[in-house]
Amino acid sequence: MKNKMYFFIVSILIISCTYKTNKNNDLYNVVIRSDSTFVTYNDTLSKREEVHMRVFQKINDIIELNFYETKYEKDKIDGIFMVKYSDEINIYVVKLKSFAILYYTVFAENIKTGKLSSNPFYINGKWMENNEAGFRFESRLLEEPLLYFKDINEDSKKEIVIKERVHNGTVYNGVIENYYSVDNDMNMNLSAAIETKYIDLHYDDCLIIRDLEKGVIKVRLKCKDSEIIDIGEVYLSYEESKVQIDSSKLFIEEYEELLITGSGIEDSVFLNEGYKFAY
């Protein structure tokens, strides 16, 4: 018992000393943008604040769980953004890098109780980096804001929406909007994943676009120098925290398999789990 207590005290002292040493380092300041979102490039103009020690420790815990090395290095934390969700809750978006791995982890903090999410979520950031710099201009799909709030299941609570650029060679290119809810314990749960953009493989210079409004996904086709065409509609409901497909309407037959996603994942699985493949 004494040994455990000693180890606990030493751990706290080490974290405290590391925090004090690094708190003036820009890596340990949070970026607070006036447009209440995050960006994939180095934002040198927005307001900065010193990160709270409990948030610093949470990020340290995340790194220990996801990287072989646990020491802080410049190539691990590449930016911390803080977005106000409500008067009591802040959302943190942390950009983490190590070799070829780049992802964003997102968690919530109740500033009154000090409680933090026990289950931060992650999105692959590799293809989003520096405003999709790895793609030709005409193949860039993301539009700001990359984070916003929207109530999709009419429960009077806005979900946190995080955009994600997805890519799998020439087979799959698109944008997913991941909708997450935050409960009273700051746990973050995926409410839905909506593929809002998908580069159509049927025709050159065409994009399938999807909008979710009041439980209906409206699917359209946008081609260069052409009018936007309606493809179909998908009607959703939400039961026991799961997205259900109630019915659909199809206006163009060749797009029957693309009303929800072009990822190759089964529709209901995609809606409830999103896209996990990354390389």
Image: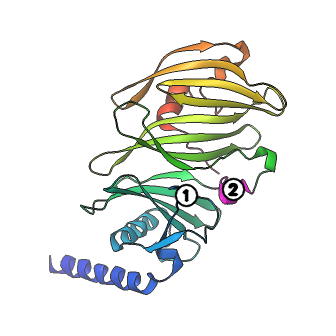
> Which is more N-terminal, label 2 or label 1?
1
- In front of the other: 262 or 195: 195
Task: Name the residue beneath numbered marker 1.
Answer: 38
- Is 189 placed above or below 93 here? above
> Does the magenta segment cover residue 71?
no
Whether residue 103 sits left or right of residue 192 in the image: it is right
The residue lying at 25 percent from left, 61 percent from top is 112
Give the magenta part as a residue range.
126-133
Whether residue 275 sits left or right of residue 41 in the image: it is left
The residue lying at 59 percent from left, 24 percent from top is 218
- Is 6 placed above or below 270 here? below
Task: Name the residue beneath numbered marker 2.
Answer: 131
Q: CA distance from mark 1 to mark 2?
A: 12 Å
As drawn, the residue found furthest toward the left would be: 1
Colour mode?
rainbow
- In front of the other: 19 or 88: 88
Regarding residue 232, the answer to whether it shows in the image is yes
Whether residue 134 sits left or right of residue 90 in the image: it is right
Q: Amino acid at mark 2?
A: Asn
The residue lying at 28 percent from left, 83 percent from top is 10
Residue 88: image x %, image y %?
30, 56
Residue 251: image x %, image y %?
67, 13
- In front of the other: 276 or 240: 240
